[in-house]
Image (cartoon, coloured by chain):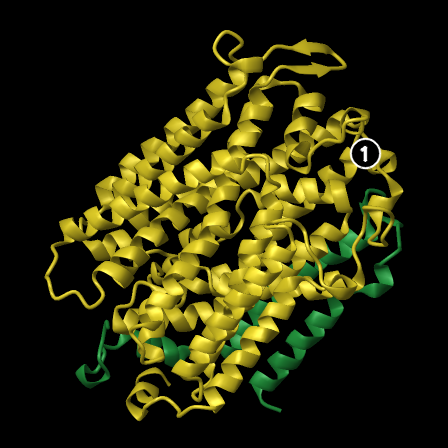
Amino acid sequence: MNKKGIILITFLIFLVLHQDFWNWDNASLVFGFIPVGLFYHACYSFVAAAFWAIVIKVAWPTALEEWAEGAADPLEGGHE
Amino acid sequence: MISVVVIAIYLGLLLGLALFSKTLFRGTSKDYFVASHSIGPFMLLMSVFGTTMTAFALVGSTGKAFEGGIGTYGLMASSSGLIHAACFLLIGIKLWAIGKRYGYVTQIQYFRARFESKAFGYLLFPILVLLVIPYLLIGIIGAAKTIYGVTVAKSTPAGEIPGAFPEIFTNGAVPPWLTGIIICGVVLTYIFAGGSRAAAWANTFQTIVFMIMGILAFYLISEKLGGVSAAIEKASDAHKVRTISGEVGFSKLTFLTYMFIPLSVGMFPHLFQHWLTAKSAKSFKLTVVAHPICIAIVWVPCVLIGVWATGVPALNGPVPTPSGAVLAKMVAVLVHDPIVVGLVTAGILAAIMSSLDSQFLCLGTMFTNDIVLHNSKKEYTDKQILFMARTFIIAIVVLTYILSLVLYKKNVFDLAIWSFSGFAALTPLVIAALYWKRANKTGAYACVIAVFLSWLTFFAMSGFGGEYFLVGGIVPAAAMWFIGAAAMIIGSLMSPPPSEKTLAKFF
């Protein structure tokens, strides 16, 4: 499987993990002050940030960046 | 009165920053609209984050958690962390690249070229303006309600607190009409001074302010409640889970389908403009990675404050505390210190104004470029272009200001969800434009018309702006998104593909 496929599957797993139905009615506290349902989603935010950092590292659109920096071909047409 | 002085000092600092950014303004329309593509990673992160976190950030998150419990974070924040970053990476960078290469400064310029239809802009422009206006309203109404709550006379367990201006205004409170004028005036001053560049500078400053003030409020409130453990012990048990219990909690379908609402960032015209201010594609890297973390830094403390508020007697009397007043009331009732009240209020205003500026600016940019300059045979100077943009911005501000007074009593957050839902439902348009070669003019028209009609239908069914769910708790944004996507696919497949020239230009 190529890089894009792995990233897409990981993203879909993230969407599923966001639903955390197993925490739905769990009122226990983590560290004595934060409800587990909130703690889970706070961690989720940080893990999502790590996921996007990895995506940027392995799948950065370098070609797109170079294309943008180049001058538009007159035949392509520019603004309007 | 001391709180008002602190707020006035904050607004003064903001204006000072505007004067500074004016010295960097190059005087060209390109600099005014997209800061000459010169904004680096940190300022891009702060301006994009500040723009997406309007009054929802501090006030809305606390109020929603007070009403619905901890599920608020998963519903609105962690989902946004994932989806917003995906939109920045998959839509933002690509639009930045296309905008940079072909000189576009608005979404409509791109869509007109991509879908080979000049008339398409005349369909999309009024719809985008219509959807931005509720977003503007939540800023102005949110600011007016916050300042009113801070300055009005109050009864607290410690005794009566007089209003800030008892000899001038009723109940001593700054009236909404005055707050609206001041807030709009300050924002207009700095965007008129330096356009996109001033907005980026002001947003960076304001985002730092509201992030720090959110943490400060969290620390001081927890201290007054006897620490974080004591605070959560006193809170209502129903708010510590997501299970539906009376008005608290969320259905699983609502939680699932709410994931569509953060897609709105893909179609916000003011974010498009912010993306185009980036110096290079690399400027996006920090925004993509740090955005979910910034959301957590602001939202986790605010959601906890909202949950703690359920255990504070002063907020749970016979007259329920309005959701928009929870944070201000927690600070006022528990902390007392007028300087802190002023600082936290300044933080709330910062969150609001950091969105208002970009929205005002983008409306002026769209009107000038998509309506006036489009197809115009006359050559305009930069000075004339800036004059047109500023005139349209003033017209929109006046209209929004009048609407904010008329709709002052509406629940501003419910109104905002309708704005976000409309933009979210339009994302099939931009996704298809960027990634589907077969997407064409017919599909684009079908998508926009189908989304607009379904939005109008659901909006009317909600009673024009109230909270509304479809069967099982499905949010209308999800249904509208599928309607828009289906219209785009069917419309495109039933008509000829785009020309080879257009495909070569964009793919």
Please state, as top left, top right, bottom left or bottom right, where the C terminus of chain B lies in the image. Answer: bottom left
Task: Identify the residue shown where x is 68% and y is 55%.
Answer: B468
Q: Position of residue A54 (x, y in %)?
A: 57, 72
The chain containing the residue under callout 1 comes to B
Quarter-of-image position of residue B329: top right
Tell which of B53 and B476 is nearer to you: B476
Please name whichever residue, B394 or B17, is drawn nearer the observer in this view of the structure. Answer: B394
Residue ID at (44%, 25%): B178
Seen in the picture, residue B25 relative to B495 is either above or below; the reply is above
| Quadrant of the image occupied by residue B434 | bottom left
Chain A: what color? green
Chain B, chosen colour in render: yellow
Q: Is residue B72 left or right of residue A60?
A: right
Name the residue type under label 1: Ala
Within 10 Å of disc 1 (Cα), the crowding (few <14, some 14-19, many 20+) is many
Q: Which residue is mark 1?
A: B231
Left or right: residue B263 compared with residue B70: left
Q: Is residue B105 visible?
A: yes
- Give the secondary structure at mark 1: helix
Vertical arrangement, residue B156 with respect to residue B449, above or below: above
- Which sits in the foreground, A42 or B176? B176
Q: Left of B13 or right of it: where is B164?
A: right
Q: Position of residue B235 (x, y in %)?
A: 84, 37
